[in-house]
Image: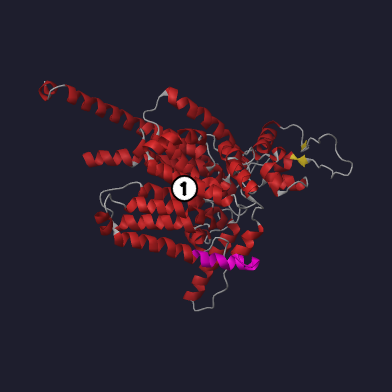
């Protein structure tokens, strides 16, 4: 009976939470990833690998594979979805099936985040912070964009396993931990910046308070390091095939290096406070992470070091490049640091009260609005509109407040709801007067870009029939089911909280009153 109760407490709320987040994400998804970042490269490579596998089984000659910029590892995650989608036609095609992958992985990331928070804080706080991470940070838009998601899931899973610190490490658990660490540092080129954080995790995971116990775990430790660096070096070699067209990886990135230390420091600061790309702007809840960090460093030093190495590694590494945030939504390259920073908030919270929850709810509301806009429109809208206005320089997209993605998406959203002036002029303020030879400013047609990327919302006002109609009803049904699952997760979490309070009260009574009095 005790084992059954423990299973209900630990598994069911997390499973409901995962199902709810996944279905709500899915209901509002665009149903496509082909125009997201470099997804088309990975889809092409995955299709070529499957075609070569079929050709090999039939005894035919294989065709060359166009390796994507991040190597083979990321394609291996895509292969099940690519293989399933290759047998479908029409609207339910390969692109549609692959669009499930980042949504699924983000849902799993939120579930692991919830489970990790349950080790540190109350059920109520765990549920609130997990929901805030899911819908009030960059996790929601990137569940559709797809970039960074695999790396972020691998890192949070490695952290969850690494901080478990159970009495004995089994080989299956050690291998799962090693695989998570290997994926975190290898699935993207930027994983190199996570090596310090992952090596710290490995040391913390295998350290058993004495060298004698460490020697007992030495075979697993060596196997873990071999897996991490073996996967990293193998995938690095395959990435070189992509960058060979630019000369080499080093030659490609040297072209984008910054000019000096001042620019480097400014870009590091911009990662956190830039209006166009700052992490706090696109995930306001993380402001509490920085405020709580001194206490986390005092009470949970290993967690603080891991978070600092993760955030510091990603920010300091990417700030060496001129495209430190590029044209995508928010501080894209800090995506993997969001979950550890949320964990830091949970580590400083005990029981959920209205007074302590108020700042979280206010920041979550701000973050929800920003994340909703990022999920409502395709992230490339800003780039395309700036291109039409002949202003799409990298510096403009990264720092020009006139082209702030949040402000532009907000303008598009209200135009979509109630119409209004169709043309918007991205005017700049000349100081003091506009030079006579300045290039002419061109207006932007809002109706061209005020198009929701969500399949459900996009076809809300459009008559359709046949397969499109059935697909629309599929997305429509996912939404209420997802909300019900989230409500069920909240109810189960509330039950957990009451059970914990009752257990503490009973234990306190037993320590104050004699056993005989309790029996009577």
Q: Residue furthest front?
A: 261
Q: 323 and 94: which one is in front?
A: 323
Residue displayed at 49% across by 42% down = 338
Q: Which residue corresponds to mark 1?
A: 309
Please tell me whether residue 155 is drawn above or below residue 490 in the rendered image.
below
Residue 162 screen position, x and y as percent: 36, 49
Residue 82 screen position, x and y as percent: 52, 60
Q: Residue furthest right?
A: 436
Quadrant of the rendered image containing residue 183: bottom left
Tell me the quadrant of the picture where the N terminus can be found. Answer: top left
Question: Which colouring convention does the figure follow?
Answer: secondary structure
Residue displayed at 28% across by 56% down = 214
Please tell me whether residue 156 is drawn above or below residue 489 in the rendered image.
below
Tell me the quadrant of the picture where the C terminus can be found. Answer: top left
Q: 214 and 441: which one is in front?
A: 214
- Magenta span of residues: 235-248
Count of numbered marks: 1
In reply to whether residue 25 is colored magenta, the answer given is no
Q: 203 and 79: which one is in front?
A: 203
**Dot 1 alpha-carbon crowd within 10 angstroms: few under 14, some 14 to 19, many 20 or more:** many
Residue 424 screen position, x and y as percent: 77, 37
In reply to whether residue 243 is colored magenta, the answer given is yes
Please tell me whether residue 419 is drawn above or below residue 56 in the rendered image.
above
Query: Secondary structure under badge 1?
Result: helix
Image position of 297 (left or right of 386): left
The answer to whether any part of residue 146 appears in the image is no
Please tell me whether residue 124 is drawn above or below residue 162 in the rendered image.
above
Residue 128 screen position, x and y as percent: 43, 33
Image position of 438 (left or right of 276): right
The answer to whether any part of residue 225 appears in the image is yes
Residue displayed at 70% across by 34% down = 415
């Amino acid at each position: 009976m005790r084992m059954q109760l423990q299973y209900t407490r630990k598994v069911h709320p997390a499973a409901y939470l995962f199902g709810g987040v996944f279905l709500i994400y899915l209901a509002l998804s665009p149903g496509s990833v082909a125009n997201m970042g470099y997804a088309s490269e990975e889809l092409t490579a995955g299709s070529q690998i499957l075609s070569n596998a079929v050709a090999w089984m039939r005894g035919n000659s294989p065709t060359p594979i166009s390796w994507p910029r991040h190597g083979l590892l990321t394609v291996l995650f895509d292969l099940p979805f690519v293989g399933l989608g290759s047998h479908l036609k029409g609207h339910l095609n390969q692109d549609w099936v692959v669009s499930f992958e980042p949504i699924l992985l983000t849902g799993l990331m939120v579930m692991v985040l919830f489970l990790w928070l349950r080790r540190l804080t109350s059920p109520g706080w765990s549920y609130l912070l997990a929901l805030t991470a899911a819908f009030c940070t960059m996790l929601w838009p990137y569940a559709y964009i797809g970039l960074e998601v695999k790396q972020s899931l691998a890192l949070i899973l490695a952290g969850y396993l690494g901080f478990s610190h159970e009495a004995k490490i089994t080989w299956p658990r050690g291998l799962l931990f090693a695989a998570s660490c290997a994926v975190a540092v290898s699935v993207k080129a930027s994983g190199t910046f996570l090596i310090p954080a992952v090596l710290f995790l490995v040391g913390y995971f295998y350290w058993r308070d004495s060298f004698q116990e460490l020697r007992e775990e030495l075979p697993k430790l060596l196997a873990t390091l071999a897996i991490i660096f073996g996967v990293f070096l193998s995938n690095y070699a395959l990435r070189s095939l992509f960058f060979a067209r630019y000369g080499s990886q080093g030659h490609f990135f040297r072209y984008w290096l910054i000019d000096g230390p001042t620019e480097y420091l400014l870009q590091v600061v911009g990662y956190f406070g830039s209006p166009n790309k700052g992490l706090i702007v696109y995930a306001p809840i993380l402001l509490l992470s920085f405020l709580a960090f001194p206490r986390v460093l005092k009470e949970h030093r290993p967690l603080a070091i891991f978070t600092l190495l993760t955030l510091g590694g990603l920010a300091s590494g990417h700030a060496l490049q001129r495209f430190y945030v590029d044209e995508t939504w928010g501080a894209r390259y800090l995506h993997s640091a969001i979950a550890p920073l949320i964990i830091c908030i949970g580590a400083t919270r005990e029981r959920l009260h209205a007074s302590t929850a108020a700042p979280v709810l206010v920041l979550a509301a701000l973050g929800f609005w920003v994340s909703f806009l990022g999920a409502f429109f395709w992230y490339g809208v800003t780039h395309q509109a700036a291109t039409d206005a002949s202003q799409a320089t990298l510096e403009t997209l990264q720092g020009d407040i006139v082209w702030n993605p949040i402000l532009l998406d907000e303008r598009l959203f209200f135009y979509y709801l109630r119409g209004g002036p169709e043309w918007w002029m991205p005017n700049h303020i000349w100081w003091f007067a506009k030079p006579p030879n300045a290039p002419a400013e061109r207006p932007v047609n809002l109706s061209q870009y005020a198009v929701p990327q969500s399949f459900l919302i996009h076809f809300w006002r459009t008559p359709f029939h046949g397969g499109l109609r059935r697909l629309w009803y599929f997305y429509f049904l996912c939404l209420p089911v997802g909300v019900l699952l989230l409500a069920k997760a909240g109810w189960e979490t509330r039950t957990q909280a009451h059970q914990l309070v009752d257990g503490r009260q009973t234990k306190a009574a037993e320590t104050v009153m004699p056993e005989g009095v309790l029996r009577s």
